[in-house]
Image (tube, rainbow, N blue to C red):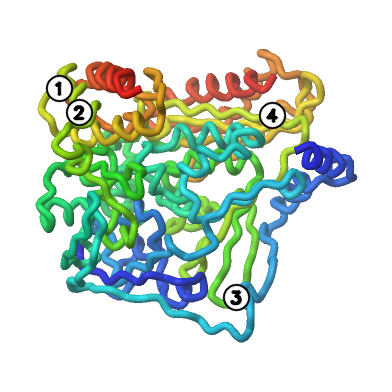
Amino acid sequence: MNKFSWYEATSIEDALQQVNKTVSEELYQSTNNAAVFKSGGIDVFDWVKEGLINPQKIINIRNIPGLDVISYDAKDGLRIGSNVTLAEMASNSDIKNHYLALHQAINHAATPQLRNMSTLGGNIAQRNRCWYFRSADHQCFRKSGDRCFARHSETGENENHAIIDNGSCVSLHASSISTALMAFNASVVIVNSKGEKKKVLMDDFFVSAGQDIAMETILQAKEIITEIVLPAPSKNTKSYYIKQVARESYDWSLGDVAVVIETSGDTCKSASIVLGAAAPVPYRSVQAQQAMEKKSINNTNAMAAAEAAMSVARPLSKNGYKVPLFKSIISEAILKIT
Amino acid sequence: MEDKKQGADSNSKKGISRRSFIRGAGLSTAGSVLLTTNAFAFGSEEKLTAGKEFGPGATTIQMKINGMVESLSVEPRTTLAAALRDHLELTGTKVVCDRGSCSACTVYLDGKPVNSCMMSVFDVGDKEITTIEGIAKNGELHPVQEAFIEHDASQCGYCTPGMVMSCVHLVENNTNPTLDDVKNATRGNLCRCGTHPHVFKATLAAANKTN
């Protein structure tokens, strides 16, 4: 790793005065005076170790007081501080009792060691895992290069890549927890250096590659995530999450789905269905949601919803298998609701 | 709990639930709600306390490790794994992937298993580090270590220290672990020799002996 200084931030305001770049901006256009945030540090150190960013200063926001609290209220829902670790979320009984799909997603994320280190803020703000993007030898569009190596129909190693919304970049968002958060209509609370605090629905927090090739979220340099908030689920809301991996112990998702359904008897009143590892950002399948709305939760309707979800799929040369994979996990997750 | 439940019911009976409001709000182009413009104004009298900056050169820090306090001169870019191996000569902790993917470098930070390769030594602060060297007490191997020998749970040995750290943590925190518990505890520990079945047997045997 190149040399950098370490700034131990004492407050949100203190941290925001020090920072001048997001890791994404630095990845897109490298400078020699970047001061970037790190919380759990897993993603940031990965980039620094690969030599893809060389920050002058790393601002440690991990120890800022007040960002490590989980609270639940039956009326207002769940609030998770951005410095809460994935391990703390995994052992939280309110999450397990009221947000099952989120609990399941956390338990399938990373390793026990990484869950003890990773924070939720860092998890949703981490960059994608495309091996070309992560390689110093490949200057792809995301790093202001002139091509997408993964897309190439013969040489592109794209078996893990996106099958939906893959027109600009074919990477996958790395946070499978975001799949579940978005299905629960979570919002991200962000404070900027002027002291303005805003709440952004997760659907609007992520930025598609078509909108901005350099970024995966709307986060700006002088902004910090303070918490993630989830509305309280109504009494008849049930949820389920499935992640398909190539290795059971732990692995990056090949495809994952979170289903949150408000039921009325065995009928789906409203559905929130989000796919992970399908598109460059977590993908809300409006098609599947519409297919389930006001329908009985049964095998025929679940299969129809899965088919509808995949109607927008445009696989690359080596990831056609993901279409049946998604059909299978989407229908299975819907049927788990009953 | 009952009160909370009633609260949820009465909320959902209103014309527009919080949930549907938020979903609706997401359809607008802005997609964000400004909550406040003075997030820092907790007390106008309060002055901003600036944090401390270290490095980029070496700074002397103190670290609580295996029940001792060690002094070492390190740069912020020094990982905890590097500090242990290169500065303190505690080479039991192995660095294999150096990216947090294999868990060979597992140590405890305040009793919790973490990857020492993916954190700066400045992340430690006043937290207590336990390494594989701190597992045996007074010259006596931990029951998990003994069971690893008895059940032939290591081959080339590179994953073994990390594997032992994961299994000791389990046995110390779960008085009656199942096979699934052992599998979950060692999920992150890669072993290219494929010693997992022996690791599972050894850990369950150690747990039985301990309890």
The chain to which mark 4 is attached is A
Residue on which disc 3 sits: B40
State the residue in front, A33 or B75: B75
Query: What label sits on residue B149 in the rendered view?
Result: 1
Q: Position of residue B26 (x, y in %)?
A: 69, 51
Per the model, the C-alpha gap separating discs 3 and 1 is 57 Å
Q: In this view, does A57 lie above or below B186?
A: below
Callout in the foreground (4, 1)? 1
The chain to which mark 3 is attached is B
Callout in the foreground (4, 3)? 3
Per the model, the C-alpha gap separating discs 4 and 1 is 47 Å
Could one spot residue A159 in this view of the protein? no
Q: Position of residue B61 (x, y in %)?
A: 23, 67
The chain to which mark 2 is attached is B
Element type at mark 1 = helix
Element type at mark 4 = strand
Of the 4 image quadrants, the one containing the C terminus of chain A is top right
Q: Quadrant of residue B146?
A: top left
Q: Position of residue A271 (x, y in %)?
A: 71, 32
Question: Which amino acid does the dot numbered 4 rest on?
Answer: Lys
Q: Are marks 2 and 1 in contact (CB under 8 Å)?
A: yes
Task: Please tell me which residue is depicted at 43% across the width and 64% down the height of the picture.
Answer: A61
Query: What label sits on residue A238 in the rendered view?
Result: 4
Per the model, the C-alpha gap separating discs 4 and 3 is 38 Å
